[in-house]
Image (cartoon, helix red, strand yellow):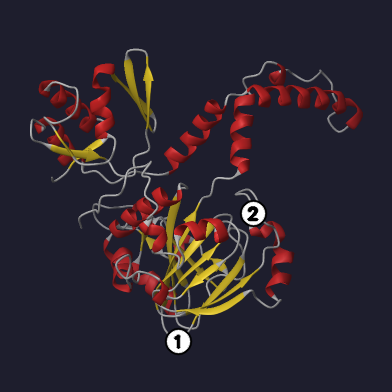
């Protein structure tokens, strides 16, 4: 399959095509009214097209039988409980003696008895979903993962629960009856899973739901984190994609600030020898001093340092467009006048000037280049296809050197005109 080019990070268009595939309102309205605030159910007729280009039941069979899938890329659940992986894995046979490969015959037997199959991390495994997740991550500005849930007829894989990330539910095949209830714990963090509120979740699930609807192929449902939900397949096999959005929160900024606070001498000071940390009177003066020092550090911390911490977390949590190593090496070796290149789609980057250098910051690395290349580098990072020989303010021979280096670094990829 040929990957569709994604817009570069920093793309300013408001079109947001991947968001439009998931919601039946304009992206700006979705952002203002629903994002992180309330569920949104959209029938297939309100969306541009269905989801069978992303995954089909035949694709599921291929993944389970021919792709050498291993744990943890597969989970199996039955009656609300996740089964041990030894119930659906085995060795891979001669030349692939790996004990945790998915066993298609074991999965078939479990599925036949009513177990739900969960394919995890499909944004790293299945080409159409790799492309879709990349685009959606660009559209949202938050990291994205994709799982698929395949449920036998008239079965339920998981009881009522909430997720600690936002989700888009995209119905792929069959029908599934969804029940959605209001949160018992609003905006949960990743360290606050539903089982910490199991009794409240069970009680809320007995109340009248906010939404009780059947999703048909092509329907979509958006749920902010914290909303309780459960689903039951109806009279045929049901499959849906759950797109998990690992939203950044204000607590993300708190975590970044606390990480930076560790540089402060006062906050690293040792507590007294023999202190009884169970005695509030002994801890209180140190807590007061800590709060005072922390407040000073928070006031003095430059926003750029917080941004760098949060940025690195996001950059390392997402991956850019897949790149063929052999083809990329050949392109870097052969690039010359007339070669067309573009920015690698979905690549997170930042361009800054540093004295007589321009610096391209990318996940885990930064590339320093002579300031004379600045105009050419900016042209290459727009995301528009560029041709060696027509880059601004740089001799043709230097253009070739620059493009070859950016190809070797995986910042650019070859493209057609």
Q: In which quarter of the image is the C terminus?
A: top left
Q: Quadrant of the N terminus?
A: bottom left
- Which residue is painted at 70% across and 76% down in the image? 206
Q: Looking at the image, is 16 positioned above or below residue 111?
A: above
Residue 89 visible in this rendered orientation of the protein: yes
Q: Where's residue 374, x and y in %?
A: 28, 23
Farthest residue toward the bottom? 235
- Which residue is painted at 34% across and 40% down in the image? 347
- Cα distance in 3D space between marks 2 and 1: 34 Å
Does label 2 or label 1 sit earlier along the sequence? 2
Q: Is residue 159 left or right of residue 341?
A: right
Q: Name the residue under label 2.
A: 187
Q: Looking at the image, is 120 positioned above or below residue 105?
A: above
Q: Is residue 94 left or right of residue 333?
A: right
- Examine the image and state in which quarter residue 15 appears: bottom left
Q: Where's residue 297, x and y in %?
A: 67, 23
- Which residue is painted at 19% across and 27% down in the image? 392
Q: Looking at the image, is 118 positioned above or below residue 402?
A: below
Q: Residue 213 carries which label?
A: none
Q: Mark 1 points at which residue?
A: 235
Q: Looking at the image, is 266 positioned above or below residue 1?
A: above
Residue nearest the observer in this picture, 80 or 165: 165
- Examine the image and state in which quarter residue 272 appears: top right
Q: Is residue 57 left or right of residue 23?
A: left
Task: Bin the neighbour count of mark 2 within 10 Å (Cα to Cα): few under 14, some 14-19, many 20 and up.
Answer: some
Give yes or no for contact between labels 2 and 1 (Cβ–Cβ under 8 Å): no
Residue 410 visible in this rendered orientation of the protein: no
Mark 2, secondary structure of its residue: loop
Q: Where's residue 315, x and y in %?
A: 43, 38
Residue nearest the observer in this picture, 370 or 255: 370
């Amino acid at each position: 399959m040929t990957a569709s080019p994604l817009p570069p990070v920093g793309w300013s268009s408001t079109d947001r095509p991947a968001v439009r595939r998931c919601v039946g309102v304009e992206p700006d309205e979705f952002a203002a009214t629903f994002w992180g605030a309330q569920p949104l159910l959209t029938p297939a007729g309100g969306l541009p097209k269905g989801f069978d280009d992303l995954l089909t039941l035949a694709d599921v069979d291929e993944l389970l039988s021919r792709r050498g899938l291993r744990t943890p890329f597969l989970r199996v659940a039955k009656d609300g409980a996740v089964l041990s992986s030894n119930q659906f894995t085995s060795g891979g046979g001669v030349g692939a003696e790996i004990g945790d490969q998915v066993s298609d015959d074991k999965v078939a037997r479990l599925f036949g008895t009513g177990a739900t199959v969960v394919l995890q991390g499909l944004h790293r495994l299945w080409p159409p979903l790799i492309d879709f997740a990349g685009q959606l991550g660009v559209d949202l500005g938050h990291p994205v993962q994709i799982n698929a849930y395949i449920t036998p007829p008239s079965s339920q894989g998981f009881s009522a629960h909430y997720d600690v990330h936002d989700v888009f539910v995209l119905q792929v095949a069959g029908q599934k009856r969804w029940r959605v209830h209001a949160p018992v714990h609003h905006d949960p963090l990743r360290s606050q899973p539903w089982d910490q509120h199991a009794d409240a979740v069970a009680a809320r699930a007995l109340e009248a739901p906010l939404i009780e609807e059947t999703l048909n192929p092509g329907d979509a449902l958006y749920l902010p984190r914290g909303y309780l939900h459960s689903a039951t397949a109806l009279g045929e096999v049901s499959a849906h994609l759950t797109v998990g959005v690992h939203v950044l929160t204000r607590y993300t900024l708190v975590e970044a600030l606390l990480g930076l606070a560790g540089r402060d001498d006062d906050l690293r000071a040792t507590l007294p020898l023999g202190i009884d940390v169970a005695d509030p009177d002994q801890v209180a003066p140190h807590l007061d001093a800590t709060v005072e020092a922390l407040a000073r550090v928070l006031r003095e911390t430059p926003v750029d340092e917080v941004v760098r911490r949060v940025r690195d977390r996001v950059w390392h949590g997402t991956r850019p467009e897949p790149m063929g190593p052999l083809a990329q090496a050949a392109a870097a070796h052969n690039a010359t006048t007339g070669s067309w290149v573009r920015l690698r789609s979905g690549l997170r980057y930042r361009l800054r000037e540093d004295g007589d250098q321009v610096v391209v910051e990318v996940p885990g690395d930064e590339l320093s280049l002579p300031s004379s290349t600045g105009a050419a580098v900016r042209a290459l990072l727009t995301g528009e296809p560029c041709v060696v020989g027509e880059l601004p303010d740089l001799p043709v021979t230097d253009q070739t050197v620059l493009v070859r280096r950016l190809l070797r670094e995986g910042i650019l990829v070859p493209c057609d005109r």
